[in-house]
Image (cartoon, grey):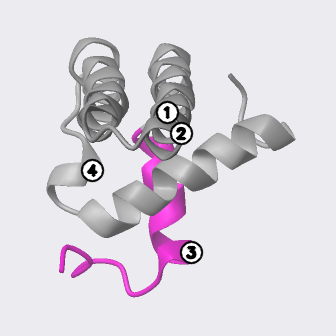
Amino acid sequence: MGTDSFRRFADFYPFYLGEHADRRNRRLHFIGSTLVLACVWQLASTGRPLWLLAALLCGYGFAWVGHFFFEKNRPATFKYPLYSFMGDWVMYADIWRGRVKL
């Protein structure tokens, strides 16, 4: 499902990083992912399902703004949903580790 051009995530990730070359886009992804974690925390704390909707809006909203306005490309989510989701979190961790510049 959605991984027809890439046999492994390790092959996809360099492509993913290339789709996030603009620093402003990476920053928006980082903000969105951080807000997703906060929403998931609230969901776990309160049990209110509205936090799941908020998490989706934060994650995809910030990322898609970055792609459409700064990167000027189509988010990889549309063609590679699973690998793109994985890429979001690997990039997020790589930013924290200093492997990807914010």
Looking at the image, is mark 2 or mark 4 nearer the viewer?
A: 2
Residue found 54% across the figure and 30% down from its top: 38
Question: Pointers 1 and 4 in contact (CB under 8 A)?
Answer: no
Question: Pointers 1 and 2 in contact (CB under 8 A)?
Answer: yes
- Which residues lie in the magenta part? 1-19
Q: Which mark is residue 16?
A: none
Residue assigned mark 4: 76
- Mark 3 or 1, nearer chain start: 3
- Mark 2 or 3, nearer chain start: 3
Q: Identity of the amino acid at label 2?
A: Ser
- Secondary structure category for the residue under label 4: helix
Mark 4 and mark 3: Cα distance apart in space = 15 Å
- Mark 2 or 4, nearer chain start: 2
Residue assigned mark 2: 45
Q: Identity of the amino acid at label 3?
A: Ala
- Secondary structure category for the residue under label 1: helix
Mark 1 and mark 2: Cα distance apart in space = 5 Å
Residue found 38% across the figure and 66% down from its top: 83
Q: Residue 10 carries which label?
A: 3
Mark 2 and mark 4: Cα distance apart in space = 31 Å
Is residue 11 found left or right of 74 in the rendered image? right
Looking at the image, is mark 2 or mark 3 nearer the viewer?
A: 2
Question: Pointers 2 and 3 in contact (CB under 8 A)?
Answer: no
Q: In which quarter of the image is residue 10?
A: bottom right
Residue assigned mark 1: 42
Mark 3 and mark 1: Cα distance apart in space = 32 Å
